[in-house]
Amino acid sequence: MDEYKTLYLSSKDSVAVALSELPAQADVILKADEYELGITILEPIRFGHKFAVKAIRQGDDIIKYGEVIGAAVTDIPAGAHVHVHNLEGKRGRGDKIAK
């Protein structure tokens, strides 16, 4: 099995980051804390981009490095690319007022 480099820091995270190009159908093993998770990548993921490590429902928080970085604007299956097409950031938005 090929080895792919990823960054997955916390078992609370809903996304990981590709540290190498990840081809579609690649099987990736993620380890954080005492937790190990196997994921099949659904579509090519470029270096530095995020992918879902579990199914994320529309409206759910997206967690990276243990922190909320945004919310899903659509359902995102495990192994899918997570980027501006399916993620709305919650930080640094001057056009939104915190509730």
Image (cartoon, rainbow, N blue to C red):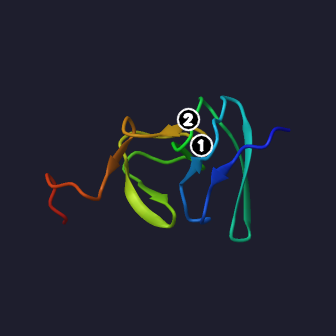
- 65 to the left or right of 91: right
**In the rendered structure, are the residues bearing label 2 and label 1 in contact, judged by CB atoms less than 8 Å apart?**
no
Rendered position, 50 above or below 94: above
In the image, 57 versus 9, the foreground residue is: 9
Which quadrant is home to the C terminus? Answer: bottom left
Asked which quadrant contains residue 4, the reply is top right
Q: Residue at point 60% right, 64% down? A: 9
Image location (x, y in percent) of residue 90: 29, 56
Give, as a three-letter code, the residue at label 2: Arg
Q: Which residue is mark 2?
A: 46
Image location (x, y in percent) of residue 50: 52, 45
- 5 to the left or right of 86: right
Say few, some or many: other residues with alpha carbon within 10 Å of mark 1 (under 14 / 14 to 19 / 20 or more).
Answer: some
- Rendered image: mark on residue 34: none
Give, as a three-letter code, the residue at label 1: Ala
Rendered position, 1 above or below 91: above
In the image, 4 versus 68, the foreground residue is: 4
Image location (x, y in percent) of residue 65: 51, 63
Q: Residue at point 70% right, 30% down? A: 25
Q: Secondary structure at mark 1?
A: loop
Say few, some or many: other residues with alpha carbon within 10 Å of mark 2 (under 14 / 14 to 19 / 20 or more).
Answer: some
In the image, 59 versus 53, the foreground residue is: 53
Q: Residue at point 64% right, 41% down? A: 20
Q: Which residue is mark 1?
A: 78
Which quadrant is home to the N terminus? Answer: top right
Q: Secondary structure at mark 2?
A: loop
Q: Mark 1 or mark 2, which is nearer the start of the sequence?
A: 2
Image location (x, y in percent) of residue 82: 47, 41
The furthest residue to the right: 1
